[in-house]
Amino acid sequence: MSNQASIEQKLQSALAPVHLEVVNESHMHNVPPGSESHFKVVVVSAAFDGKMLVARHRMVNEILAEDLQRIHALALHTYTPEEWAERGQAPQSPPCQGGGKQQ
């Protein structure tokens, strides 16, 4: 199973999100083609209700503990359904600033 599919499956199962995006952003970094090393995750779940941002991120990190051994970077955007209704989208990832990536 790919890293992306594993992340998606575990978050779906553990958090029952109303919205989930798992984006492989490895192509934006200095890694071989086809790599699965850099991900952006947008997850909207009622499981985050009443939790501070750090607690939400800890929840996701615990769910993905095994996967985090195989990837280099994970950008997390965690929202409650109410927050998502107000926001409607996650911020864009900035361009890679290191590692020799040619712009």
Image (spheres, rainbow, N blue to C red):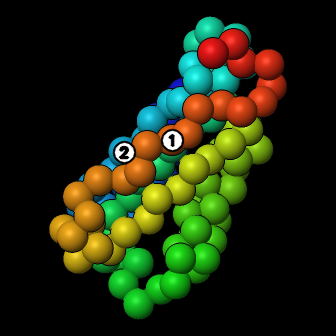
In depth, the one of 102 and 72 nearer the eye is: 102
- Left or right of 62? Residue 69 is right
Which of label 1 and label 2 is nearer to you? Answer: 1
Q: Residue at x 59, y 13 (%)?
A: 34
* Residue at far left of view: 85
Q: Label 1 is placed on what type of residue? A: Ser
Q: Residue at x 43, y 43 (%)?
A: 92
What is the number of the mark on residue 21? 2
Residue 29, position as x, y percentages in the image: 66, 24
Q: Label 2 is placed on what type of residue? A: Glu
**Residue 3, located in which quarter of the rendered image?**
top right
Residue 88, position as x, y percentages in the image: 23, 58
| First-in-chain label (1 vs 2) | 2
In depth, the one of 40 and 95 nearer the eye is: 95
Residue on which disc 1 sits: 93
Number of marks drawn: 2
* Residue at far top of view: 33
Q: Residue at x 58, y 68 (%)?
A: 57
**Residue 83, located in which quarter of the rendered image?**
bottom left
Residue 16 showing in the rendered view = no
* Residue at far bottom of view: 50
Residue 26, position as x, y percentages in the image: 60, 26
What is the number of the mark on residue 102? none
Q: Quadrant of the C terminus?
A: top right
Residue 102 showing in the rendered view = yes
Q: Residue at x 62, y 9 (%)?
A: 33
Q: CA distance from mark 1 to mark 2?
A: 13 Å
- SS category of the residue bearing label 2: strand
Residue 101, position as x, y percentages in the image: 72, 18
Neighbours of disc 1 within 10 Å: few (<14), some (14-19), many (20+): few
Q: Is 53 situated above or below 60?
A: below
